[in-house]
C-alpha cells in the first residue's frame, strides 16, 4: 500500500524513499496510540507508519506475494499479509533449547515462586471514616480490646466472637487465607511484617473501621518445578528473541533508506507486538 500526499502546515512532510506518508494518515493512526500527549501520540503513529512503509517496500522489492489469513477471527489486510510473509522469509530466530530454558529458570527463580498466603484473625470495630465521632469511638474500643489481647493472647478468639462487627466473628475472627492485594492497603501493610502468632501492637485503621489484627499462620509460596514452566519459558525466550531480531531488521532497513521529515534513532517496530 502506498499513501498519497496530504499536507498539513503544522507538521513536516514525512517520506520513506520519496514515498510520502500523508499527515491525514498519521492523524488516523494516532488514534491507536496512547501517548502521554498529542505530540507523543503523533510521533508514535509516524514511527509505526514509517516502519510499515519500510517493510512494505522491502517486500515489494523481493517480489513477495501473500494471501491474507484470519487470526483469532480477524482477517489480515493485504499489507499485513505481505509484511508477515516478509518477516517469515527474512527474520530467523533459534528455538529455545533445554539448556537456555534451564539457565533462565535458575536465574529467575523468584518469577516462578507461588504467592505467599496469610491466615489473619481480626476484631473489627466498624465505622465510616467520614463519621469522625463514630470512628473515634471505634478506635477507643479497638484500643481497649487490643490491650486485653496483649495482656491475655489466648482471649483473642473469644473477644472476636463477642465484639467483632465482621461476619468472621462467628469463627473467632478468622479470615481464611489471603494473598497480597486481597485486603485494604492499610490492613496489608500491618499484616505483612507480622510473624506467625504475633499481634499487631497498634489498631489498624481502614475504610471499614478499626481492626485488632493477629497473624495466625503464613504459608510461604513454593517455587514451581522446572518441568511445569519449561514451555512458558521457551515461549518467552523465543518471543523475546524474535522481537529483538525484528527490531534489528527494521533498524537495518531504516539505515539503508532515505527517511525525511522524521528522525528514527534505533528504529523499532511498533507494528509487531
Image: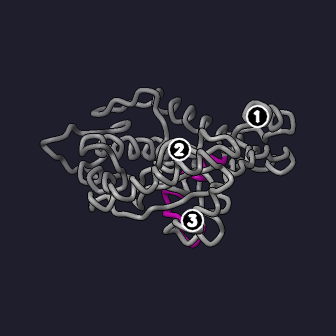
Residue 264 visible, this angle: yes
Q: Is residue 158 left or right of residue 13?
A: right
* 195, 269: nearer the viewer: 195
Residue, x 51% and y 54% (percent of image)? Answer: 145
Our reading of the magenta stretch's main secondary structure is: helix
Rendering colour mode: one colour
Q: Which residue is mark 2?
A: 190
Residue, x 31% and y 45% (percent of image)? Answer: 41
Tell me which numbered mark, 1 or 2, is placed earlier along the sequence.
1
- State the separation of the CA atoms marked 1 and 2: 34 Å
Tell me which numbered mark, 2 or 3, is placed earlier along the sequence.
3
Residue 70 visible, this angle: no
- State the separation of the CA atoms marked 2 and 3: 56 Å
* 127, 69: nearer the viewer: 127
Residue 36, position in %: x, y?
A: 30, 43
Q: Nearer the viewer, mark 3 or mark 1?
A: 1
* 155, 222: nearer the viewer: 155
**Badge 2: how crowded within 10 Å, few (<14), some, or many (20+)?**
some
Q: Quadrant of residue 107?
A: top right
Residue, x 50% and y 31% (percent of image)? Answer: 251
Q: Pointer 1 and pointer 2: residues touching (CB < 8 Å)?
A: no
Q: Which residue is mark 3?
A: 68
Range shown magenta: 72-88
Residue 120, position in %: x, y?
A: 63, 55
Amino acid at each position: 500500500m502506498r499513501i498519497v500526499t496530504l499536507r498539513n502546515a503544522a507538521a513536516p512532510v514525512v517520506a520513506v524513499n520519496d514515498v510520502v506518508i500523508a499527515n491525514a494518515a498519521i492523524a488516523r493512526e494516532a488514534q491507536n496510540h496512547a501517548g502521554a500527549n498529542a505530540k507523543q501520540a503523533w510521533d508514535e503513529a509516524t514511527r509505526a507508519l514509517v516502519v510499515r512503509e519500510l517493510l512494505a517496500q522491502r517486500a515489494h522489492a523481493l517480489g513477495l506475494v501473500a494471501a491474507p489469513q484470519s487470526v483469532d477471527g480477524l482477517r489480515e489486510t493485504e499489507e499485513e499479509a505481505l509484511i508477515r510473509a516478509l518477516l517469515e522469509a527474512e527474520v530467523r530466530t533459534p528455538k529455545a533449547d533445554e539448556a537456555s530454558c534451564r539457565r533462565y529458570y535458575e536465574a529467575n527463580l523468584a518469577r516462578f515462586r507461588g504467592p505467599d498466603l496469610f491466615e489473619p484473625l481480626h476484631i473489627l470495630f466498624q465505622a465510616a471514616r467520614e463519621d469522625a465521632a463514630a470512628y473515634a469511638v471505634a478506635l477507643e474500643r479497638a484500643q481497649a480490646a487490643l490491650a486485653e489481647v496483649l495482656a491475655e493472647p489466648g482471649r483473642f478468639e473469644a473477644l472476636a466472637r463477642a465484639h467483632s462487627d465482621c461476619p468472621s466473628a462467628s469463627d473467632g475472627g478468622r479470615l481464611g487465607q489471603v494473598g497480597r492485594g486481597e485486603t485494604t492497603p492499610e490492613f496489608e501493610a500491618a499484616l505483612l511484617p507480622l510473624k506467625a502468632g504475633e499481634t499487631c501492637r497498634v489498631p489498624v485503621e481502614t475504610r471499614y473501621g478499626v481492626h485488632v489484627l493477629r497473624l495466625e499462620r503464613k504459608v510461604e509460596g513454593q517455587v514451581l518445578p522446572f518441568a511445569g514452566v519449561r514451555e512458558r519459558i521457551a515461549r518467552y525466550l523465543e518471543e523475546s528473541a524474535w522481537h529483538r531480531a525484528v527490531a534489528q531488521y527494521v533498524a537495518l532497513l531504516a539505515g539503508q533508506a532515505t527517511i525525511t521529515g522524521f528522525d528514527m534513532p534505533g528504529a523499532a517496530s511498533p507494528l509487531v507486538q
